Amino acid sequence: MLTVNDLMTAIPYTVSSDTPLRHVIELMKTEGCRQLPVLEEGNLVGIVTDRDVRLVMNSPMVLHGHWQDEELLDRVTARSCMTANPMTVEPDTPAYQAARMLSIFKFGALPVVDKGILVGIITVTDFLENFAAGQGDIVIEGSE
């Protein structure tokens, strides 16, 4: 049976809860990830997503001029916009069960923990890549 361990990204990029939003965005861009587990003293305390970042920067609840974006990038931290105590899975969780959780809750990723320690992250992209790999060559119209 396919498990989370078979598909997950091991040892994912992480940020601390006091990481400024500017660094969160830079890490997401440079490493091509959309979700970052948030750690405090090595313990998983949350997850921050590209959607969380967009909501902070473009929130209709926080009226600000674009000239204030620089201040937001330096003053807002991962703690301020993360989802605290995220739902997690273990490495031996059946892959179909993690996929069902992602689908039901409309999450893009689930942190993977083993005995309370973050060991990976499983994303919708991991499932899509696994599916595509089993389908042979993919021809994309107009890309030739």
Image (cartoon, rainbow, N blue to C red):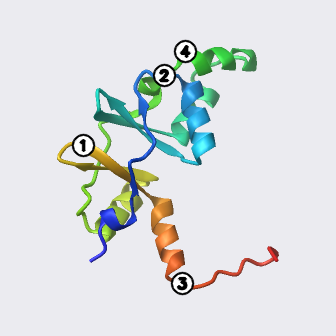
Tell me where residue 48 appears, x and y as whole percent: 46, 37
Q: Earlier in the sequence, mark 2 or mark 3?
A: 2
Q: Check the image and report above or below for 143 versus 79.
A: below
CB-based contact (under 8 Å), mark 2 and mark 3: no
Q: Which residue is mark 2?
A: 77
Tell me where residue 30 appears, x and y as whole percent: 62, 41
Q: Which residue is mark 3?
A: 135
**Amino acid type for the residue under numbered disc 2:** Thr
**Amino acid type for the residue under numbered disc 1:** Ile
Quadrant housing residue 21 = top right
Residue at point 55% right, 15% down? 75
Report the Cα–Cα distance between label 2 and label 1: 23 Å
Of the two numbered discs 1 and 4 in the rendering, the one whose residue sits closer to the viewer: 1
Tell me where residue 141 appears, x and y as whole percent: 77, 78
Quadrant housing residue 22 = top right
Q: Which residue is mark 1?
A: 117
CB-based contact (under 8 Å), mark 4 and mark 2: yes
Q: Earlier in the sequence, mark 2 or mark 1?
A: 2
